[in-house]
Image (cartoon, rainbow, N blue to C red):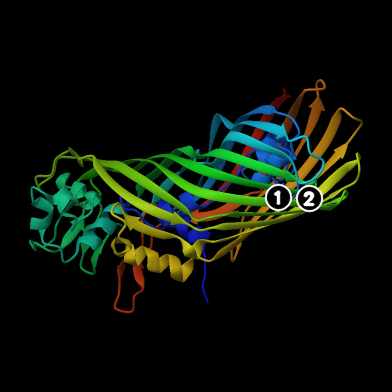
Amino acid sequence: MKRFSLIAIIMLAANIAAGAQGVEDALRYSEQFYVGSARTIAMGNAFTALGGDLGAVGINPASSALYNCCEFAITGDISRNKTNSLFYGSNDSFSDSVTKTNFSVPNLSMVFALPTGKDWGLVSYSFGFGLTKTNNFNSRIRFGGADANTSLLGNIAAGLEGVNKSELLAEDAFDYGYCTNQEILAYDTYLVDNYNGLDDSYIGATENEWPGGLGVDNLLDKSYDRTTGGGMYDIQFNAGANINDRLYLGANFNVKTVDYEENLWYGENAYKGDVFDSAFKGMSYNYWQRTEGVGVNLQLGAIYVPFNFLRLGISYTTPTSYFLTDRWQEYMQSSFDTNNYGYKSAESESPLKEFEYKIKAPSRLSLGTAIVFGTAGLVSFDWESVNYGKMKMADGTGKYSTFDDVNQYIADYCTKCNIFRVGAEMNLGSNFALRGGYTGYFYENPGNKYISFGCGWRLSENSSLDLAYRTSLKDQYQMTPYDDYAYDEAGKAQCLAPVADITSRYRDLMLTYRVKF
């Protein structure tokens, strides 16, 4: 049976052996956490069958066809990500909390509705333009504490077993690709050295030798700090048609922009001096990445009103083709006390690397139903399906074979996600409305879940304000700063990396101003 583990993907992204494109990249740009307007957010974005809101054009492009006038709307958003961590060291647990706040304009849209003057057939048509945020990468995760069981340097040394040191010392080592940047940097800064005089065996500066073998067994102060930023936007070119005031059709040509930045810092420091044979004092590792690119897709939608109280909607988005460029660089620094091995404090930096590649994100299908209670209010229900097992990665020339292992992993372990959205609106008079909503992402195991509420004021005959507040329910998962290592013949790891329990929560406060003209 296929198994999709979002936590496994998160842990892949957490480990600090970075610099290669993989499953986490495909998922990051394939997932969509639609923002829209304050009204759509307040109602859980359950707008597949509703339409009539510029924030819903990216949910169902037929939304614009319900307009009988021209409108402009702009939305501002203050988002806040708070992360709590509990790090389990060898002797105790250590808690930490960090918050990151960001302001953005998640929606800027305009529609032009043009009536034909007919009462039958094509009653009106519309053209629209929109800029809508579909993903927010702003987050920060920080954890750390005292641990004496394993170390990043032991992990690196174990991974180098069997690799001749000539590969690490080669002038083109960073370009050759046989060793990772991290391994080369660790060797350059004396944090990993050859063991017992062998050219293909290694020991980490945090490992001591005993009759029974190698190990850390001394307290290290470990710190992990990862900040991400940027986001994804859809530039929407929309067209809609109103047929008999019963059938509304629409289409979007979407150009998707990608801007992602990651800064990762990890450090290990000796709690006491003279406890390591290498006289190790401390080390730090920095990783920086920037991803930029564009994607394109086509979106088709329809809304049908068989009765005045009932609306049915459908929206289909074709697979998205992304063209991306990664740039990244890594840095490592070491410090030692005076010792008999000739080690010294050092620093080393990898060259700035660049790689172009492509991602094919899967198609999306959304169905919706809405019940309208005259002028009193409405309720709306959406179901959306996307199969992440259909994701594909290729190099810049379009060769899928470059990512055979990654694509096989996607096919084996990534499966469908069902997204459920529910929204309600209650009108308190002609100028004020209350709203509420829920959005849930369900893989094999439940994923992100959001609840929201808001209100709307009619300021005049042609203008209005909408306010919304959305919060995610607590998202809990585990992270490790590096992989387990030293596997025995049975495939069981002898050195287990420390674990941090992470709890994160996103909150948004949005305000939309709209004016008709």
Instruction: Pick whichever of labels 2 and 1 is earlier in the sequence.
Output: 1
Instruction: Name the residue beneath numbered marker 1.
Output: 48
Q: Position of residue 207 (x, y in %)?
A: 24, 56
Q: Which amino acid does label 2 sit on?
A: Ser
Q: Residues within 10 Å of mark 2 (few under 14, many from 20)?
A: many
Mark count = 2
Q: In this view, does 44 lie to the left or right of 275?
A: right
Question: Label for residue 450?
Answer: none
The disc labelled 1 sits on which kind of residue?
Thr
Q: In this view, does 82 lie to the left or right of 161?
A: right
User: Residue visible at 21% across and 48% down?
Assistant: 186
Nearer the observer, 461 or 68: 68
Above or below: residue 366 compared with residue 514: below
Q: In this view, does 297 lie above or below 9?
A: above
In percent of width and height, residue 367 lies at: 70, 57
The quarter of the picture where the C terminus appears is top right
> Which of the two residues, 122 or 455, is positioned nearer the viewer here?
122
Which residue is found at the position 57% from the left and 37% from the top?
A: 132
Mark 2 element type? strand
Mark 2 and mark 1 in contact? Answer it, CB < 8 Å. Answer: yes
Q: Is residue 486 left or right of residue 513?
A: left
Which residue corresponds to mark 2? 380
Q: Which of 170 and 514 is in front in this view?
A: 514
Q: 56 or 182: which is nearer to us?
A: 56
Q: Is residue 268 visible?
A: no
Task: Give the SS element for disc 1.
Answer: loop
